[in-house]
Amino acid sequence: MANRGKDQPPKTIGELLDRFGEAAEKGDEVSLDDLMDAIGRRSFGPLILMAGIVMSAPGISDIPSVGTITGLFVGLVAGQMLFGRDRFWLPGWLLQRKVSSKTIRKVAESKWTRRPAKFIDKLVTRRLEAFAGGKANIVVAAACLILALAGPLTEFVPLSGIGVGAALVAFGISLVARDGLMTLVGFGLTAVTLTIALVALT
């Protein structure tokens, strides 16, 4: 399964969730490195999508340190996108971070992730390409970097992690499917989420 992930990154949210489930079947714990093997290491879109799914899954973003670690992950990936790298690097200590397979299965199998995934996958198509691909991806990377910086704040503002996660899912889809509409949705969710978080903290 690892080779399939490396050669062919997932094209839909449903396929990415399937690969989460496959990774969870290999042991009691799943490392970030294991998830990388499952979804591939050559494309930035699935990585942003993966982070978004983790953050937006109900109950997951509320786990202590998840917001901070996910923010660090997204920041490293988005930063390398901004610098035009075609492959990314992550520190070994981050790749070895582990979570229980039960938690990953919950993300992969929950109706709260599967139902929205099925609905969104039906809507996604290649459109509004002025807002997807090429220079537009640089703007998307910058927005993801801002969301990454907000990651630690989600541990102090209830439910804000779901908003950050939803925005990352939208950006991840835009990168994978070249769907400019999802880029615009991502910008809207980013603005709303950050505004709510700042109001809550003041």
Image (cartoon, rainbow, N blue to C red):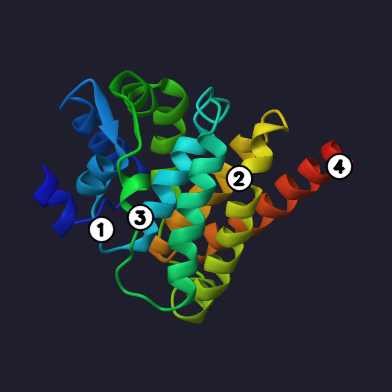
Amino acid type of the residue that numbered disc 3 sits on in the rendered structure: Pro
Nearest-to-viewer mark from 2 and 4: 2
* Mark number, residue 91: 3
Q: Residues within 10 Å of mark 2 (few under 14, many from 20)?
A: many
Residue 28 point in image, percent of width and height: 23, 20
Q: Is mark 4 on a helix, strand or loop?
A: helix
- Marks 1 and 3 sit apart, C-alpha to C-alpha, by 14 Å
Identity of the amino acid at label 2?
Gly
Q: Residue 151 carries which label?
A: 2
Q: What residue is pinned by disc 1?
A: 41
* Residue beneath disc 4: 199
> Could you tell whether 96 is left or right of 148 in the image?
left
Please state which of the two labelled residues, at mark 4 or mark 3, is closer to the viewer: 3
Which of 69/129 is in front? 69
Label 1 vs 4, first from the N-terminus: 1
* SS type, badge 2: helix
* Dot 2 or dot 3, earlier in sequence: 3
Q: Which amino acid does label 4 sit on?
A: Val
Q: Is residue 11 above or below residue 38?
A: below
Residue at image location 54% in from the left, 66% down from the top: 140
Chain-order first, disc 2 or disc 4: 2
Residue 75 versus residue 140 in the image, above or below: above
Q: Nearer the viewer, residue 100 or 11?
A: 100
